[in-house]
Amino acid sequence: MFASLRSAPLAYLIILATVVCSIRAFTRSSFFDTWRMHPYSVYRGKRMSTVLTSLLVHVDGMHLLINGALLCLTLPEVEYMLVDDFGTIGGRCLFVLFTLFTAVFAGTLTAIQNRHRIRHWSAGSSALIMAMLLYFLVYFPVEPLTVDSSLLPPWKPVWLALGILALLLAFVFFKIPASAIHLYGAVAGILFAFATRPQALNEMVELICPFVKSEKGDNESTRYNHTGKYPVSGSVEKGTFAAFATLNGIRLLKVKAVHPLGNHQRCKRFCVRKHQLVN
């Protein structure tokens, strides 16, 4: 269910730091006050470091328990995905960049939104969790999620992502406390997914708007392949598929794709029965 420590060491290091810092904040109010984000000050160029440190402290034990569990479900999986697709060094550099981008993006928008509210404070990893979750869903938006076929038909991640966005927008509209920073985190995840895999945007547009056709012919690919080179009509070499194969890669396999949230071994879905190719 969870990626191993060896597969996602940075993710588990962040989770450990979050637990340690939060527990310390529970026992020392001065530590919590120093590390939580004060948007009023951040907007005026002060306490800038709290954009990052506020992700590591929580209000109380229940807040930490919920966010800690969600961090375990999302962070290791995303790190595993990035390492599997971009290599050990490149993937982990992207993971660190993603974390920093989310903190700065959500923190900046929160500071702008609450620039006149001197008593507003922010703490917790919610923005990072939403960023990782939406990244997971949007990175490969047309691959069906694994569900019990006897209960529900396969869901495409894009619909779940849009549903989460709609719910967050409703929370913001009705002024639910702390809803805006969740939305900012979700938007950060979507933007980073498009940045690391641009064809995801094309796939979303084609799915949502089926009347939109590619300007290129069927023999000319409109997407780049970051998971390895392979011939269209030839055989696929072992190990060329990464955690998320491109859409063209999926078309080569006569195997039903699955996308289980939290299953760090999903790259194997493209390697099973890979000898069954479309002739």
Image (cartoon, rainbow, N blue to C red):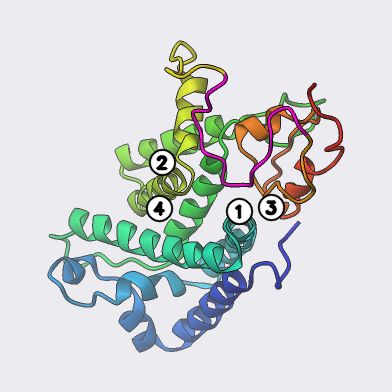
Question: What is the magenta range?
Answer: 219-234
Cβ atoms under marks 4 and 1 closer than 8 Å:
no
Q: Which residue is mark 4?
A: 185
- Is 227 inside the magenta-drawn segment? yes
Residue 262 image label = 3
Of the residues under marks 3 and 2, which one precedes in the sequence?
A: 2
Q: CA distance from mark 4 to mark 1?
A: 23 Å
Of the residues under marks 2 and 4, which one precedes in the sequence?
A: 2
Disc 3 element:
loop
Q: Mark 1 or mark 2, which is nearer to you?
A: 1
Q: CA distance from mark 3 to mark 4?
A: 19 Å
Q: Between residue 73 and residue 196, name the one nearer to us.
A: 196
Q: Between residue 157 and residue 70, name the one nearer to us.
A: 157
Residue 168 image label = 2
Q: Three-letter amino acid code at disc 2?
A: Leu
Q: Write the residue at 42% across / 64% down.
A: 97
In the figure, 40 relative to 203: above or below?
below
